[in-house]
Image (cartoon, helix red, strand yellow):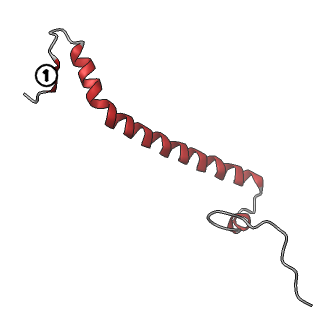
Amino acid sequence: MASRPSLRAKPKGKGGARGAAADPAGEGATASATAVRLVKEWTTWTMKTAKVAAHYGFIPLVIIIGMNSDPKPSISQLLSPV
């Protein structure tokens, strides 16, 4: 008689079933690991977004601050390197 295939769902993603065996404490450790992973993902997303904002927003910020300064320079004076 041939053995039947298992009907249990297989874990997806990195690590496979290792997470259940490595977590003998139960739900508490899993929740904290999930919280750490979420904080890491949000931190990475925030840093990438801040990098893009700084990259594309620096020169417009300099122009806006320069246009609002006391001796009003022209736009060509703001953009020229001298």
Q: Position of residue 54 (x, y in %)?
A: 34, 34
Q: Circle 1 sits on which residue?
A: 76
Position of residue 78 in the picture relative to residue 35 (left or right): left
**Dot 1 lies on which element?**
helix
Q: Quadrant of the C terminus?
A: top left
Q: Quadrant of residue 65?
A: top left
Going 69% across and 66% down the picture, which residue do you hit?
22
Q: Quadrant of residue 70?
A: top left
Going 13% across and 22% down the picture, which residue do you hit?
76
Q: Single out the residue that lies furthest toward the top.
A: 70
Position of residue 29 in the picture relative to residue 71 (left or right): right
Q: Position of residue 17 (x, y in %)?
A: 71, 68
Indicate the amino acid at tag 1.
Answer: Ser
Going 29% across and 31% down the picture, which residue do you hit?
58
In the foreground, 73 or 26? 73
Vertical placement of 51 versus 32: above or below? above
Vertical placement of 61 versus 67: above or below? below
Q: Quadrant of the N terminus?
A: bottom right
Vertical placement of 13 versus 53: above or below? below
Q: Single out the residue that lies furthest toward the right.
A: 1
Going 88% across and 88% down the picture, which residue do you hit?
2
Position of residue 18 in the picture relative to residue 2 (left or right): left
